[in-house]
Amino acid sequence: MIEREQVLHVAKLARLRLSEDEIEKMTGELSGILGHVDRIGELALDDVEPTSHVVALENVLRPDEPRPSWPREAVLEQAPDPAENAFRVPSPQAEG
Amino acid sequence: MGELLELSVAEAAARIGAGELSRAEYFEAWREAAAGDELNAYLWRAEDGTVEADGPLAGVPVAVKDLFCTEGVETTAGSRILEGHRPLYTATAVRRLAEAGAGILGKTNMDEFAMGSSNENSAYGPVRNPWDLERVPGGSSGGSAAVVAGGLAPCAIGTDTGGSIRQPAALCGIVGLKPTYGAISRYGMIAFASSLDQCGPLTRDVTDAALLLAAMQGRDPCDSTSVGIEGGVEAPSSEDLKGLRFAVPAELAHDAIESGVRDVFEATLKRIEDLGGEISEVPLPHAEHGISAYYVIAPAEASSNLARYDGVRYGMRVEAEGDLVEMYETTRAAGFGDEVKRRIMLGTYALSSGYYEAYYGRAQKVRTKIAEDYAAAFAEFDFVVTPTSPSVAFGLGEKTADPLAMYMNDFFTVPMSLAGIPAISIPAGLAEPDGGGKRLPVGFQIAAPAFSEQRLLDAAYALEQAIGFDAISRAPYSSQSGERRTGSDEGGGG
């Protein structure tokens, strides 16, 4: 089960603004999904190694050779608010 | 022109190679067919089709899921947040197809960020199933499956994270292959769950799937997890299944499967025996926990991957009154759809302090157990077979209200993704949905050990010849007259 307060906390971590309707719906839906997922809690897994990746590769390296990066103008063309050769964003600290 | 559209990719490529068919004529024929899309399957279509490169796919038009970055061509991943986004580079898989001579025919609709099993999560509207316009094509590569089944493209590529190639291929009556994780580069594929995502072909037949895989597979310096398939991939040619050992999961008897799907599955097992293959049961006790593990691991990885959509460097931004964080929050609230928000929430929760071990940690251990089950099965058997999907194509809107019911569509496809092994879905016949109605395609799934794609394709080819399911003549939507064909009973099973 998941409570409304947890939904609000997780939404904040995920940088998602949820409407009142979404909070209510999300609380019910996440509870339902987690209720199903909780069944893996019954499995004996103490001595099992976790798998984060299926390909047995370690430290794939390449020669450290300099190469040109993307032209700045081309990259900034995709930006919602480019300014002075950079990405402009609102202030990290709201005024007042 | 209709005749041109009935050629398989392999046949068309052979004629072009022999100088019997002009590239321009073939491409143009498909461009005209694609222009008749009434399935909402394309998000973008090529305006011209000049293909210059020589190669095994010279002149072949390919429909590309909108998850693959294409330089200068809008790439949205089915999301509002990337509307208008024109990538600076092209995905390696697409680039390799182009180097083999193929041209992009269009970009196909999909569930937003590949999250979905019905294509109803696209910000650009659902795709319709060419077999029945009131039903879903499956997802998330629903557009790629629908264009091939509906006669709007000769072949397509998609991505599969937990079944997103195999399930729509099954629901649309075509072939869909998810290669081994690492067979094809993920560079330029918009990331959903990086430890699971894999590119693959959606085609009318197994030979065409092999042809596309051969062109796309291989190591790529831009994706350190790509290793390629040793020895490459050749056109399959096996005539029988003599001496091959096929295993059916013992738990399958208890699983919720539509009766029509079960009938076709059992008829297909019989065909395997007729071709000289042996059928046995094998225990895969952890496969039933695949959905639980998958719906923790995939959302966890997604919540991290989708953190990049913040309204700063590309994509949409919604200006807010307050500070930077408010801009992030309002942009993401407006840019993401319901399912994407649900998965970001689920993943963030599973990774959050206090819950990490219980969810993410345990799910990764279940993943180990599932991989061990398959390793044990493959010590004794060549292949594991299941139905691809528990049901035939379901109705638009039928499962949208219940996320968990929707997730259950992935029951048979998720375990192979978690284990990283290759699996193919081939059309095995037609079946009525539970409760009756028009007969619809049923997919048969064959899974094999990692990097044994050649053996998988050979077996699928032999079985395909015996089933005799003709994807093109059965595609009701492809009929030039607009009149929908119903398809004969041949190969219908049951």
Image (cartoon, coloured by chain):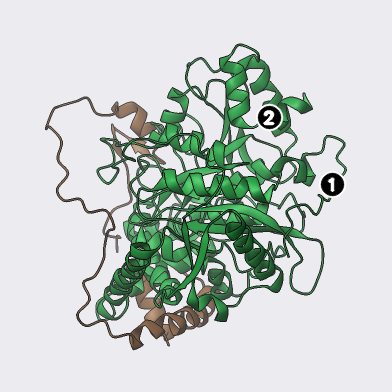
Chain colours: A brown, B green
Q: Please say if B400 is above or below B4.
A: below
Callout 2 environment at 10 Å: few (<14), some (14 to 19), or many (20+)?
some
Kindly identify which numbered label has been placed on residue B485: 1
The reply, left or right, for residue B419 in relation to residue B269 is left
Indicate the quadrant containing the C terminus of chain B: top left, top right, bottom left or bottom right: bottom right
At 64% from the left edge and 32% from the top edge, which residue is drawn? B8
- Of residues B479 and B118, the one nearer the viewer is B479
**Residue B438 image point, x, y percent:** 81, 61
The type of residue carrying mark 2 is Leu
Secondary structure beneath dot 2 equals loop
Residue for badge 2: B7
Mark 2 or mark 1, whichever is nearer to me: 2
What is the residue that sits farthest to the top in this orientation? Answer: B19
Tell me if label 2 and label 1 are in contact, CB under 8 Å.
no
- Tell me the CA gap for discs 2 and 1: 19 Å
Kindly identify which numbered label has been placed on residue B459: none
Q: Is there one chain holding both mark 2 and mark 1?
A: yes
Q: Specify the subunit that label 1 lies on.
A: B
Q: Quadrant of residue A12?
A: bottom left
At 37% from the left edge and 41% from the top edge, which residue is drawn? B184
